[in-house]
């Protein structure tokens, strides 16, 4: 256990703390002469960075509202009506959630940019280009990304909201609409957490900031922070000053949420909660609801998917809409060329696949240990762990990456023999450290339901420690572990901000290779690579889920599964 | 003010074919207290929900006051039926204070907000919660939440109050106190009340009239006294409390309408168990019978706990004998379980004195507490008995 704490301190706490400290005490790290200064915070609040911060704030607020405005009705329709196709919606929501934000952004960009798919199809609509390549497009894309968070938060709350609250309102004189207005506030905790998550996700997003927003000359804070480090000369203290502002911004909705819900309980679950009744959708209601939900998925998945696939099948700089596989051929040629030039035997996609698998495996082990600690009796140490993990979830990836660059590039590191900077190990450690907090949160629910007696019973009946764990505990948590593994794998496979900041030169992961192709105007090849990357990720998910279904004993699969009624 | 209710041939089938109610007909007098009694799955909750308008009826008709609120085609929504309801889980809206929960039910009376709030306070005062009016449901105990739910149901002075097992989530002591409060408050309101429960003691204590439901059918609707002294079916008898049941054979008719019967117990049990008593059992005894029977017919005799008395040392004439298999102290006295033979046991046999386990005792039967029904196939009877007991004791 001390090793676990040491690793947490070295890989989560220290880099971020050093980086944040840098903004106010640059002399500590030989980055300036001041031992205490607010200059860099002030600098972050002026000029271009201030514009970027303000942009990020309002865009993230708007995106969170868009997320709840779309996610709430979908969650309601799925939970309370006979909406056609409602069974596939949760899966589709996960797809929206797992796609890195830069992929749909690129898909949209490829459609609407000059010489994009839209113009090739003969649709000369510059106003669409202006609309999407600007604040509206950024809000739309970030908002669409918030929808799954809202949907999941509201769905979970609605699952526990029995029918009786609505029935009680109806029998005491409320019309259907009044009853709905009465019970919506019961969902306040879910609405608040959806808004807080949506805001935090949007303000810390790097994918849209580095693609659509950057191409549209609409600066956002995360990209400005990246630029402060990436431009020459790099200014780490200024980046750290911006990091403070980002972290403070994430704290705003959390504070608002805590204030709004203080001292109130919205507990609605009891052993006798009556399952809510589904309302049958008929006629225009059914058409409107289905059409609305379908429109969301078309905009969130269909259009960018079409943009990416069609973009990958169009020759660059061509004026016509003739389809070709030339980009895919060019991609393989590029890979072979890179391999021949000493870029290693792995293509960027294969590399990301390996990184994803290694990271997911390490993260699940670490996440499980953290979840065990969190679910035990609360002590000061577990309280500190809880806070550290919670704070890390809220920490934007780009701040994390900047912290890593800064901390592991310090001269003191090479003096003590830690030469991780610009190695693949640092990238994998950073992936792991940034995934661990979420992973631990995902697992803590399942782990806290574990009865100690499961293992004790196995031990009491003659099993050794490992057998007892494998027979008594693993079966119960196997499904959450597989899900947490997949969640981490998908997150890492096409991760952008950490990869951008920390990848080993000459060995770019998939997201960087795609970005490189796009920034060098190889749009078609970049799109082909994106399409293949998503296909790889989906295939990997399919293989893992299929493997679990085929190989896990039937009893393991029953636990946590749903029973067909 | 209070509304009469007429239910005619009510039927309810859920999607998927589960028939919850079959041809239920019932009249409820205005201002009376009807308790629907039955085990889980008997259809009592469905019936209440049909009355509330939360469920649509499949067939039949419900009339509340002069208004037909449901029939095959018509369905008046719950908010237009002018009724109120106490829910099993109270269904207090967690984001509203106790006062606002209560005041909500007054909205339909078109009062101003201050009027609603002051009347809600008055109502909370009546249920003893004036001081807790600003608390949220999670800050109230189970009993206090129950009172808020009751206040919400009473405040709008509706002609009909529905209660969906409102005491089932409370502990025994609080349940008894709340039962008394509910009884007093709803009678004071003079509204017609329909109350459902699976607890026969609660039903008898509250009701002017009890309707017993079995598998979606109304098997008996009568006063608590009639249900207890003249159960219409073996199910009603079992569900409303039995010491036990024994197989008998009819031996003759009595001038007062009673029947003379003789027990049919296995393995010469009576002789065996009477070994310790000075005289043998009388062999025949009298019982009340709703059935036409002729001498020699087999029948099932159901014995209420009040229909059997324990005789020790042959101090009085007795009809049966058995061995004490268990004894439990109940404060007022002792309840004994008595084995008559290998398969027949009487439970809850009360005596002011304790008889030790293993002793042989005599049992004197009171014809008023012994009810005869046509003999049933044993397996079916046993199953039904177990189901009825399980339903009746689940709280």
Image (tube, coloured by chain):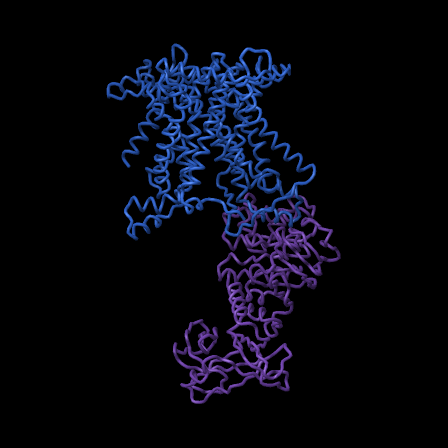
Chain colours: A blue, B purple
Q: Residue at x 70, y 38 (%)?
A: A283
Which residue is at the front of the view, A481 or B204?
A481
Question: What is the quadrant of residue B128 in the picture?
Answer: bottom right
Q: Residue at x 29, y 31 (%)?
A: A6
With respect to residue A136, does B312 lie above or below?
below
Which residue shows up at 60% across the image and 83% down it?
A: B259
Task: Return the residue nearer the eye: B305 or A429.
Answer: A429
Report the label total. 0
Spot the residue most to the bottom. B279
Residue B291 visible in the picture: yes
Please identify the quadrant where the N terminus of chain A is shown. Answer: top left
Q: Position of residue A194 (x, y in %)?
A: 52, 33
The answer to whether B175 is drawn above or below residue A322 in the figure is below
Residue B371 left/right relative to A430: right
Q: Quadrant of residue A288?
A: top right
Q: Is residue A384 visible?
A: no
């Amino acid at each position: 256990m001390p090793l676990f704490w040491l690793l947490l301190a070295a890989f989560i706490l220290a880099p971020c703390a050093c980086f944040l400290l840098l903004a106010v005490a640059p002399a500590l790290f030989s980055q300036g002469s001041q031992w205490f200064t607010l200059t860099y915070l002030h600098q972050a609040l002026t000029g271009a960075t201030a514009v970027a911060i303000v942009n990020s704030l309002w865009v993230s607020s708007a995106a969170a509202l868009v997320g709840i405005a779309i996610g709430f009705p979908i969650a309601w329709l799925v939970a309370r009506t006979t909406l056609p196709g409602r069974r596939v919606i949760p899966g589709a929501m996960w797809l929206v959630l797992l796609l890195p934000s830069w992929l749909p952004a690129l898909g949209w960009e490829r459609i609407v940019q000059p010489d994009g798919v839209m113009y090739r199809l003969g649709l000369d609509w510059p106003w669409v280009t202006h609309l999407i390549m600007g604040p509206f497009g950024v809000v739309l894309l970030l908002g669409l990304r918030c929808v799954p968070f809202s949907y999941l938060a509201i769905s979970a709350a609605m699952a526990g909201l029995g029918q009786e609250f609505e029935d009680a309102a109806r029998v005491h004189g409320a019309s259907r609409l009044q009853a709905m207005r009465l019970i919506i506030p019961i969902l306040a905790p879910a609405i608040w957490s959806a808004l807080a998550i949506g805001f935090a996700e949007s303000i810390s997003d790097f994918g849209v900031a580095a693609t659509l927003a950057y191409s549209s000359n609409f600066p956002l804070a995360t990209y400005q922070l990246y630029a402060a480090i990436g431009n020459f000369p790099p200014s780490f203290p200024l980046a750290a000053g911006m990091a403070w502002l980002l972290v403070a911004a994430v704290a705003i909705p959390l504070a608002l949420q805590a204030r709004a819900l203080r001292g109130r309980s919205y507990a609605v679950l009891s052993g006798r909660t009556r399952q809510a009744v589904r309302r049958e959708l008929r006629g225009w209601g059914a058409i409107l609801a289905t059409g609305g939900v379908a429109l969301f998925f078309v905009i969130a998945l269909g259009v960018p998917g079409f943009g990416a696939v069609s973009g990958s099948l169009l020759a660059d700089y061509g004026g016509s809409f003739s389809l070709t596989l030339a980009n895919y051929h060019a991609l393989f040629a590029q890979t072979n060329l890179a391999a021949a030039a000493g870029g290693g035997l792995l293509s960027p996609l294969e590399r990301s696949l390996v990184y994803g698998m290694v990271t997911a495996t390490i993260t699940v082990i670490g996440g499980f240990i953290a979840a065990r600690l969190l679910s035990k009796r609360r002590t000061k140490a577990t309280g500190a762990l809880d806070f550290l993990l919670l704070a890390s979830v809220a920490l934007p990836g780009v701040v994390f990456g900047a912290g890593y660059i800064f901390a592991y590039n310090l001269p003191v590191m090479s003096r003590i023999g830690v030469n991780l900077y610009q190695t693949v190990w640092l990238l994998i450690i950073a992936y792991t450290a940034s995934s661990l907090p979420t992973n631990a949160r995902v697992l803590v629910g399942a782990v806290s339901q574990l009865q100690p007696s499961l293992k004790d019973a196995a031990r009491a009946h003659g099993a050794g420690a490992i057998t007892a764990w494998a027979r008594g505990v693993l079966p119960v948590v196997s499904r959450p572990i597989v899900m947490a593994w997949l969640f981490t794998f998908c997150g890492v496979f096409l991760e952008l901000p950490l990869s951008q900041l920390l990848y080993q030169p000459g060995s770019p992961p998939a997201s960087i290779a795609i970005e490189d192709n796009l920034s060098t105007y190889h749009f078609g090849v970049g799109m082909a690579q994106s399409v293949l990357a998503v296909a790889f990720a989906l295939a990997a998910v399919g293989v893992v889920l299929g493997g679990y279904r085929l190989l896990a004993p039937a009893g393991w699969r029953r636990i946590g599964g749903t029973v067909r009624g | 003010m209070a509304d009469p209710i007429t239910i005619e041939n009510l039927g309810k089938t859920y999607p998927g074919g589960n028939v919850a109610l079959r041809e239920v007909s019932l009249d409820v007098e205005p201002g009376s207290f009807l308790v629907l009694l039955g085990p889980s799955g008997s259809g009592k909750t469905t019936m209440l929900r049909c009355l509330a308008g939360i469920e649509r009826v499949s067939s039949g008709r419900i009339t509340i006051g002069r208004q037909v609120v449901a029939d095959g085609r018509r369905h008046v929504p719950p908010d237009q039926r002018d009724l109120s309801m106490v829910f099993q889980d109270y269904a207090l809206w967690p984001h509203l204070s106790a006062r606002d929960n209560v005041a909500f039910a007054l909205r339909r009376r078109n009062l101003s907000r201050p009027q609603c709030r002051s009347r809600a306070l008055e109502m909370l005062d009546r249920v003893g919660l004036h001081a807790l009016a600003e608390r949220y449901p999670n800050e109230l105990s189970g009993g206090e939440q129950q009172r808020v739910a009751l206040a919400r149901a009473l405040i709008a002075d509706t002609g009909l109050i529905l209660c969906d097992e409102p005491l089932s989530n409370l502990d025994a002591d609080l349940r008894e106190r709340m039962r008394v409060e509910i009884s007093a408050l709803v009678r004071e309101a003079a509204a017609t009340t329909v109350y459902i429960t699976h607890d026969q003691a609660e039903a008898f204590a509250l009701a002017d009239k009890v309707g017993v439901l079995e598998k979606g059918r109304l098997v008996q609707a009568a006063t608590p006294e009639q249900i207890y002294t003249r159960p219409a079916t073996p199910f009603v008898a079992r569900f409303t409390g039995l010491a036990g049941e024994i197989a008998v054979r009819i031996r003759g008719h009595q001038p007062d309408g009673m029947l003379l019967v003789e027990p049919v117990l296995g393995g010469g049990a009576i002789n065996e168990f009477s070994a310790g008593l000075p005289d043998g059992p009388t062999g025949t005894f009298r019982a009340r019978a709703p059935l036409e029977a002729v001498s020699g017919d087999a029948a099932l005799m159901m014995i209420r706990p009040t229909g059997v008395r324990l005789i020790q040392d042959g101090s009085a004439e007795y009809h049966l004998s058995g061995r004490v298999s268990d004894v439990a102290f109940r404060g007022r006295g002792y309840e004994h379980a008595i084995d008559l033979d290998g398969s027949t046991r009487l439970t809850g046999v009360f005596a002011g004195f304790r008889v030790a386990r293993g002793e042989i005792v005599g049992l004197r039967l009171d014809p008023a507490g012994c009810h005869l029904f046509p003999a049933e196939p044993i397996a079916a009877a046993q199953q039904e008995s177990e189901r009825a007991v399980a339903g009746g004791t689940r709280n």
